[in-house]
Amino acid sequence: MSFRTTPSVDYVEDVSPGTGALAPRAWYATSDAQSLSLNGSWRFRLSATADAEDDSFAEEGYDAGDWAEVTVPGHWVLQGDGAFGSPIYTNHLYPFPVDPPHVPTENPTGDHVRVFDLPADWPADGGAVLRFDGVESCARVWLNGTELGEFKGSRLPHEFAVAELLKPAGNVLAVRVHQWSAGSYLEDQDQWWLPGIFRDVTLLHRPTGSVGDFFVHASYDHTTGEGTLRVDSDVDGRVSVPALDIDVATGEPVTVAVEPWSAETPKLYDGELVTAGERVPLRIGFRTVVLEDGLVKVNGRAILFKGVNRHEWHPEKGRALDLETMREDVLLMKRHNLNAVRTSHYPPQPAFLDLCDEYGLWVIDECDLETHGFTEQAWRDNPVDDDRWTPALLDRAARMVERDKNHPSIVFWSLGNEAGTGRGLTAMAEWIHGRDPERLVHYEGDWDCRDTDVYSRMYADHQEVERIGQNLDGGTLKRRELPFIQCEYGHAMGNGPGGIADYQQLFERYERLQGGFIWEWIDHGVTHPELGYAYGGDFGEELHDGNFVCDGLIFPDRTPSPGLVEYKKVIEPVRIDGDGADGTVRVTNAYDFGDLSHLRFEFSYQVDGFPTGAHTLAVPPLAPGESAEVKLPASAPDGDGAEVQWTVRALLAEDTPWAGEGHEVAWAQRTVASRAPLPAATGAGPTADGDRITLGPATFDARSGALRSIGGVDVTGLRLDVWRATTDNDEGASWQDDTRWGVLWRQLGLHRMRHRIEGVESDGDALVVRTRVAPAAREVGLRTVYRWTSDGTRVRLTVSVTPEGDWKVPLPRLGVRFGLPAEGTDSAAWYGSGGEAYPDTRAAARHLQWDASIEELQTPYVRPQENGARADVRWVELGGLRIDGAPEFWFSARRWTNEQLDAARHLTDLTPGDTVWVNLDHGQHGIGSQSCGPGPLPQYFLKAEPAEFSFVFSVAE
Ligand code: GAL
């Protein structure tokens, strides 16, 4: 006797892509055929296992009225206030045993039911198709009790023919979604695991004679200025483009003079594909992508990718993004000079690609494929090298290419990410090359470039990138003939990335280097009632990778981080060189296609950081790559001992679709006359009175030499400070075998330095406090002398630091810190860089007079860490004091100590106290990108070596 107690769920662990779905085809948002969105509120029931419930919920008449509800598109774990489970974050580890194709018995399964009526005017004839744009990770579908099939491939569309099953009213659409399936083994991207129907569900009417699949081929011949259009269509019809007087049959090529499409000049022509039963709007961009002379060329020109990796993310909706959020991403990218996006690591919602076509971004469209977790077992059993999985891989490749092939913005198809190497990948590449020879194939995981048209790497350090640029890197013959891109670099986790200006210089110096894509666009923080933004581990995950999921150029709420501001400056498309000493500057057009006629140039002098009025700089409309010497429009004002600088700004001359007139695209600033040295503050000597010493406006503790007040303002704890709350990039990633300074600093004890007072004495006019600053258990130390002088109204501190012992590490920071009463210290005004800057993240540091509240001086990295330093500060005023530096210094101020900042896990751990803590730093160590890439370059190290620096304190006027 045999029996079965549970419904069959064998399909969940079946390596095949699924059954029942229609062949993939071109995706389009609108046509004159009717459609019905099935987005909205669905009935929802969650089970703990795939087989807990039978199929009866899919039957007509089943009453799901007492079920919960979820919003589709959406992820159930982000709905229901925790009642539907929680998100899980892992980088590359599978959160289940690696036993392909098996998945855990504990397999959260969400049954979804939606009852719908057809609109009254829904045509009675023709066909109908039910389209799912994205379901994670495996779905089984029924309509009116009839099973349509089941599918995997979370970020890919699946269509089912349903005409025979539809009724005018009371249609019951039932979808069973399993969190885990064989498909999960192919979807091991570094992101939250988020089950659900997270993209649109749509019912499409298919009139008789409607459009099936179609392929728009629109090339551009840069030698003739002509474009050739041919639209291949499964269903014959006509193609019209009124602006070009085109009206041809499908399949028939036509060549006419056109304006080409590029990311800089995204010219789209509106057209239409008309078959007997349907009219589909087309947006056609003419461009030709080739690999020629070892370079990726579009329309005859080599291009330089100034790109970013974009995951789909919204802090409340996860990967269920709405159109406005997608548009915000594109607008932010355009406004920050980016020209390219890699859709890491899956095809995005189709609407995002429409936006890339429209606003102009080069796209690497990446397949929904990653098997990174197999690296834990030396890639044994990797699905991409196992023929049983090849149909699933080919299905994924086809669903991406067929869906997205009509987007001019896509220049590369990417096979996937971090999936090792194997026959399955080769099969995908062969299929893609055959289906779309007009685009190139990308994949980073195969350094021999067997299947690819570009040599792509991630996180290669500057030295290696330079060797690749020089063609000294060896490799297979095929690789040596290919151009190079960094598909990921500049790991933007927390504070950073540092060193991107140095990369950009290499990209611009060596022809073979065609740019790169910063990792990554947005922090995937999840809005959380207590924590602000949650990251890995905050939902009690058994395995997780902490805040490694927060490594974007924008914060979860899409506010640009300083990293994005830096990147914008580093990749600006206009270069302004020279100091203007000969009355001219050199302006270079660094665009690949556009001239400079869309920009106007504004020139101004600043005296002590104050602009003195703007002039126009007459820059000719240079062609791409051209430069010109441009005469400065005005001569420098007499600074009279003040510092004089000039600034050139390249601004949009007119509104564009992505930014308004006046938007700044590029800028440069130079110093014409330096500020006068700070006058010495001498004349008034220290006097002792009981437990107090007085020196000009300052009082000190007689025993310890500690500063107590200046001009009646209480000052606490002024002393040398070398510690900074380690950044993610200081700490580095655990797998990094290079030196990780953040780890060594802590081992050495730089976060718990002791200050031994050796002497408090007067030395002529000066009060001198001699100390030795050192960590317990170590012999290294910093002999530190504080020398105070005064002219009666101001007090000058000179700090001399002499390292002792064998310092094997650079210092995190070197300067002084002190506390001011929080009451009365709400804001600061300063002359120096406006935004956050560190030694290797200071390209965008613009020197002016600024002010900000203490809150605004903080950069809200999702995991708290060192942040907010302002560079090149000449003076700062806060809490009633003015502090002038000799030389310029780094300034930061916060309502908590660096130790509290260091200990915090979330911003909500930081609570203001009664003191504002100020750091005035002579030096800061570089930031680098070691949370996944290389650490800071040696030139940005803050070496432990003798140093001397001064601050002059006075009462602010
Ligand atoms: C790469 C990977 C990305 C991400 C990044 C680190 O190796 O492709 O998905 O994990 O590292 O944030």
Image (cartoon, rainbow, N blue to C red):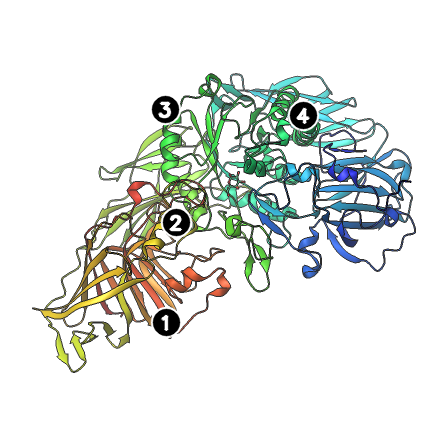
Mark 3, secondary structure of its residue: loop
67 sits to left or right of 98: right
State the mark number for residue 470: 3
Viewer-side label of 1, 4: 4
In x, y percent, where is residue 943?
A: 25, 48
Which quadrant of the structure image shows residue 739? top left
Q: CA distance from mark 4 to mark 2?
A: 43 Å
Mark 2, secondary structure of its residue: helix
The numbered mark, 4 or 2, whose residue comes first in the sequence reads 4
Q: Which residue in the structure is indicated by mark 2?
A: 730
State the mark number for residue 387: 4
Q: Please state which amino acid type lies under the numbered disc 3.
A: Gln
823 sits to left or right of 297: left
Contact between marks 3 and 2 (CB within 8 A): the answer is no
Mark 1, secondary structure of its residue: strand
The numbered mark, 3 or 4, whose residue comes first in the sequence reads 4
Q: Which residue in the structure is indicated by mark 1?
A: 915
Q: Work out whether residue 718 can be spotted.
A: yes
Q: CA distance from mark 1 to mark 4?
A: 65 Å
Q: Is mark 4 within 8 Å of ligand 1?
A: no
Q: Please state which amino acid type lies under the numbered disc 1.
A: Thr
Q: Is mark 2 within 8 Å of ligand 1?
A: no
